[in-house]
């Protein structure tokens, strides 16, 4: 009898072992197989959370077929203790193994909330944006003046969340004063700004931030980027340009930046100023006159008066010869490149053409016709 009982127990043990092995193999295949998720989701892992809570959330959102296997797989891979807080974009069809790798690797959040401080030529705006996982596009949920009094509640709420990401984006053509004023108004930053960076030395770009970042360090970072861009542009300059230094190139680039917002015509605008410098003609560009009035502190907000075109300032290129003494804004890389690689033209005039671009001319007669057309466009707009 004992021999039969032992035989049966051994049989049960073997069957049980086979079942266990089969379950493990099945579990492994489930863990590494393509997941059931059909549409991307944003998985938020709170601080102090654990794999059990994450697995339940994933199961609820249809991202994993079995939360138990997800937890066991993470335990078996010795990754449960490596869970990182954050917001993670979980794409369709990803396996449990890939999700575990994603939430334990850490790094910057890949979805959730982003607050962007946009420093523009005419205004600074803070935008609260949420990523829509379905199309991987950010949707704006609030926009406001960060220096104003009307701060939306959602901004305060999102500022309190640890996984909110931050960026500051500088538009091409902003002045250093505008950037500093915007940086001062950003409550995500800390520290004081003691010196105004030199005009033209802050690189227009998008910069990732962390909560509590130092204002002076951020400005220094912008200056480092611009220094590298200036050096690269100067190194690639055409031969024979009437520019004697990187500083002169920067000044010309800033004028180009303020004269046109059409990327395709930057090199043509550059050619006008290069031709004028070569011929000893005054540059006669309105943005320099405006800078002489505002010193880059805000926008003029009106048209120039004839008396202002005649007023003696270091930047009034209707009065002075050659380039002004400093840049008049912070130019982007495209304007730097245009300054050292102007189009090969005979143009010495240009005027707005009513489409956002300019009409170029080689003779005064042709230019006067273009000006007359522009005056007609201005008159039509004023009457409509």
Image (spheres, helix red, strand yellow):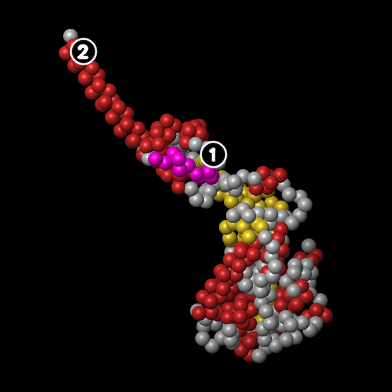
Q: Secondary structure at mark 1?
A: loop
Residue extending farthest to the front is: 2
User: Residue at the location (66% across, 52% down)?
Assistant: 127
The kind of secondary structure element at disc 2 is: helix
**Residue furthest right as drawn:** 307
Q: Is residue 186 left or right of residue 132?
A: right
In the depicted view, which residue is nearer to us: 260 or 179?
179
Is-magenta flag for residue 123?
A: no
* Badge 2 vs badge 1, beta-carbon distance below 8 Å: no
Report the front residue among 363 and 74: 74
Residue 206, above or below 246: above
User: In the rendered image, which quarter is residue 216 located in?
Assistant: bottom right
Q: CA distance from mark 2 to mark 1?
A: 51 Å
**Where, by quadrant of the figure, is residue 349 drawn?**
bottom right
Find residue 221 and report its horizontal and vertical position in percent.
Answer: 58, 66
Asked whether, in this view, residue 234 is left or right of residue 8, the answer is: right
Where does residue 92 sit, x and y in percent of width and height? 45, 41
Name the residue carrying label 2.
Answer: 5
Please give the name of the residue rendered at 50% of the width and 44% of the height, measured from the top-left corner.
Answer: 84
Residue placed under numbered mark 1 in the picture: 48
- Residue 376 — which label? none
Could you tell me which quadrant the C terminus lies in?
A: bottom right
Q: Is residue 265 above or below residue 111?
A: below
Residue at point 48%, 33% (across, down): 52
* Magenta range: 78-90
Looking at the image, how many numbered discs can be counted on the residues? 2
Observer-nearest of 24 and 362? 24
Please, which residue is most extreme toward the bottom here? 280
Residue 156 shows in this picture: yes
Q: Residues within 10 Å of mark 1 (few under 14, many from 20)?
A: few
Q: Is residue 79 magenta?
A: yes
**Residue at the (54%, 88%) spot, across then down:** 240
């Amino acid at each position: 009898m004992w021999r039969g009982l032992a035989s049966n127990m051994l049989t049960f043990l073997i069957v049980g072992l086979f079942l266990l092995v089969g379950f493990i193999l099945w579990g492994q295949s489930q863990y590494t197989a393509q997941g059931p998720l059909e549409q991307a989701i944003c998985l938020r892992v709170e601080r102090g959370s654990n794999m059990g809570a994450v697995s339940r959330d994933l199961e609820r959102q249809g991202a994993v077929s079995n939360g138990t296997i997800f937890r066991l797989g993470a335990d078996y891979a010795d990754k449960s203790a490596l869970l990182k807080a954050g917001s993670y974009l979980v794409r369709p069809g990803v396996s449990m193994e890939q999700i575990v790798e994603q939430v334990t690797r850490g790094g910057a959040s890949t979805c959730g909330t982003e607050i962007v401080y946009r420093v523009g030529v005419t205004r600074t705006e803070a935008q609260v944006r949420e990523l829509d996982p379905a199309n991987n596009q950010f949707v704006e949920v609030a926009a406001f003046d960060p220096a104003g009094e009307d701060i939306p509640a959602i901004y305060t709420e999102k500022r309190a969340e640890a996984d909110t990401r931050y960026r500051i984006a500088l538009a091409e053509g902003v002045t250093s004063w505008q950037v500093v004023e915007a940086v001062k108004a950003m409550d995500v930053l800390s520290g004081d700004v003691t010196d105004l960076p030199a005009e033209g030395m802050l690189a227009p770009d998008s910069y990732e931030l962390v909560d509590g970042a130092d204002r002076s360090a951020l400005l220094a970072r912008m200056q480092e980027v611009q220094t590298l861009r200036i050096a690269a542009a100067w190194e690639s300059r055409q031969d024979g340009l009437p520019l004697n230094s990187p500083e002169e190139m920067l000044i010309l680039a800033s004028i180009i930046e303020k004269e046109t917002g059409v990327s395709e015509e930057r090199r043509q605008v550059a050619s006008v100023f290069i031709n004028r410098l070569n011929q000893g003609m005054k540059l006669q560009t309105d943005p320099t006159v405006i800078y002489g009035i505002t010193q880059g502190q805000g926008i003029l907000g009106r048209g120039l008066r004839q008396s202002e075109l005649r007023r003696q300032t270091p930047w009034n290129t209707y009065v002075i010869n050659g380039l002004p003494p400093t840049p008049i804004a912070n130019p982007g890389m495209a304007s730097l490149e245009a300054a050292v690689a102007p189009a090969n033209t005979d143009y010495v005039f240009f005027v707005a053409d009513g489409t956002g671009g300019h009409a170029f001319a080689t003779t005064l007669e042709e230019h006067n016709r273009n000006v007359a057309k522009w005056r007609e466009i201005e008159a039509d707009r004023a009457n409509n």
